[in-house]
């Protein structure tokens, strides 16, 4: 891809990378207070093991842009959007050069899976509600899960507890947001919470997929669709998308790169 060499970027990619979610998500990886919580939302393993690999690239390519984005008096949003899409693209390609194309592609997919609009979000939100009813015994609308799922229920409940505790802990350590925004906590904390919202059902469904065979998984899907219909009668149980997300791989694990990192 020539975009990073000739300082040109397609209009479509310019529009995609102009969304501040990209810059904020990539900033999340370098924040000291956030690092203990990053494994829970499954950042690329290499960046978890060698955080300096991304931190050094970020400091050179994106740190100053992030600072400007938080000080609107120094640069208008329009001026910022004209500059940082190319900087993000260059930073990602530099990661591919230094850490390998696979980790850069994994990071791109991580951002797109959790922080950009993705087709899995509505189904995962539905699965999240259903999965919680495997252990919320007092719910009047609860349908007992199938026997094949029962041995995994304690693990699902433990996973839910882990995410719940992390939400409280990250709120305690996250700094306040910029004064001009008027929020009590920084936007990166909100981003982490958004990612965690989907990471929980992804990981719970992975546990199920790892333990059950195809026939047993079908039994789980049938139960989940019945449970979803009872919980919200007007809700279409097909929003769960069958067993599409009941798998070991995360949603979008094979998404083609929009940054020219694959192929």
Image (spheres, rainbow, N blue to C red):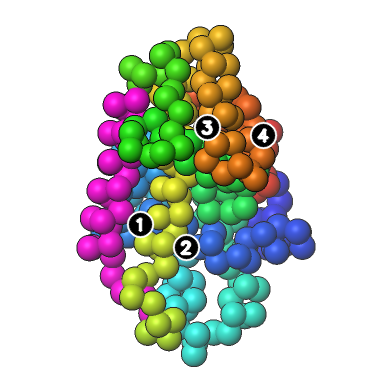
Instruction: Residue at 45% x, 71% y: name it.
Output: 66
Q: Secondary structure at mark 1?
A: loop
Q: Which residue position holds label 2?
A: 24
Q: Which residue position holds label 1?
A: 30
- Find out whether the residues at labels 3 and 4 contact each other: C-beta distance under 8 Å: no
Number of other residues with Cα within 10 Å of mark 4, as a class: few under 14, some 14 to 19, many 20 or more: few
Q: Secondary structure at mark 2?
A: helix
Q: Specify the quadrant of the image occupied by residue 87.
A: bottom right
Q: Give the residues in magenta.
A: 153-178
- Find out whether the residues at labels 4 and 1 contact each other: C-beta distance under 8 Å: no
User: Which circle's residue, 4 or 1, is located before the other in the chain?
Assistant: 1
User: Which circle's residue, 2 or 3, is located before the other in the chain?
Assistant: 2
Residue 16 drawn at (x, y percent): 67, 59
Number of other residues with Cα within 10 Å of mark 1, as a class: few under 14, some 14 to 19, many 20 or more: some
**77 vs 135: above or below:** below
Quadrant, the C terminus = top right
Quote the CA–CA distance across marks 3 and 4. Answer: 12 Å
Closer to the eye: label 2 or 1: 2
């Amino acid at each position: 891809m020539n975009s990073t060499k000739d300082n040109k970027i397609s209009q479509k990619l310019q529009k995609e990378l102009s969304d501040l979610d990209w810059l904020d998500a990539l900033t999340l990886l370098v924040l000291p207070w956030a690092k203990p919580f990053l494994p829970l939302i499954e950042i690329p393993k290499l960046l978890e093991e060698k955080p300096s690999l991304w931190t050094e690239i970020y400091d050179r390519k994106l740190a100053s842009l992030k600072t400007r984005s938080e000080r609107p008096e120094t640069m208008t949003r329009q001026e910022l959007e004209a500059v940082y899409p190319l900087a993000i693209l260059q930073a990602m390609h530099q990661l591919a050069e230094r850490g390998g194309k696979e980790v850069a592609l994994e990071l791109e997919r991580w951002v797109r899976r959790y922080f950009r609009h993705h087709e899995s979000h509505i189904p995962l939100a539905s699965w999240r509600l259903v999965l919680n009813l495997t252990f919320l015994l007092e719910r009047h609308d609860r349908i007992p899960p199938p026997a094949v799922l029962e041995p995994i229920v304690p693990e699902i409940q433990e996973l839910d507890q882990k995410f719940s505790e992390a939400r409280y802990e990250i709120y305690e350590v996250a700094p306040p947001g910029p004064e001009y925004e008027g929020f009590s906590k920084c936007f990166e904390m909100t981003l982490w919470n958004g990612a965690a919202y989907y990471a929980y059902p992804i990981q719970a469904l992975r546990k199920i997929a790892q333990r059950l065979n195809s026939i047993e998984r079908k039994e789980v899907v049938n139960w989940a669709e019945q449970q979803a219909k009872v919980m919200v009668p007007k809700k279409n149980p097909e929003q769960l998308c069958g067993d599409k997300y009941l798998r070991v791989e995360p949603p979008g694990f094979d998404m083609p790169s929009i940054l020219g990192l694959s192929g």
